[in-house]
Amino acid sequence: MAAPTIPEPVASFIAAVNDHDEQAFLDAFAPDGAVDDWGRDFIGRGQIKTWSDKEFIGSRGTLAVEEVDVAGRTVTVIGDWRSNHANGRSKFVFDIDGDKLAKMTIREG
């Protein structure tokens, strides 16, 4: 089975995450971008970095993509998340603004 096609900028974002490339991860977000991690909101690159240092890039997370759905400027990715912080099937919903991520929402997949 072929891997699902992931549109940009989400494809580059996932590659940055899986490569543990903090700068590319942060650069993927708009300056006022946000992360909603199970109802906890982190707004702006400073808050996103603080959260990520512990729970995302800093925990050596990787995402094995299983499903992709595109609806307008929203890309939903479901996959197997593995890290030193949390593990399991997760759903990532990305709201796209131009070539940046406006918001990433994480929920159970």
Image (cartoon, grey):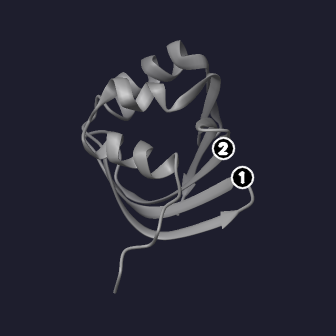
In the rendered structure, the answer to whether residue 32 lies left or right of residue 48 reads right
Q: Which amino acid does label 1 sit on?
A: Arg
What residue is shown with label 2? 96
For the point 67% across and 38% down, the residue is 98
Residue linked to disc 1 = 73
Residue ranking furthest to the right: 72
Relative depth, front residue between 79 and 24:
24
Circles 1 and 2, Cβ within 8 Å, touching? The answer is yes
Residue 61 horizontal/vertical position (percent)? 30, 43
Mark 1 neighbour density, 10 Å: few (under 14) some (14–19) many (20 or more): few
Q: Which is nearer the eye, 18 or 5? A: 5
User: In what element is the residue under mark 1?
Assistant: loop
Residue drawn where x is 46% and y is 26% of the image: 27
Q: Is residue 1 above or below residue 9?
A: below
Image-quadrant location for residue 51: top left
Q: Position of residue 52 (x, y in %)?
A: 41, 27
Rendering coords of residue 85 (x, y %)? 32, 39
Give the residue furthest to the top.
46
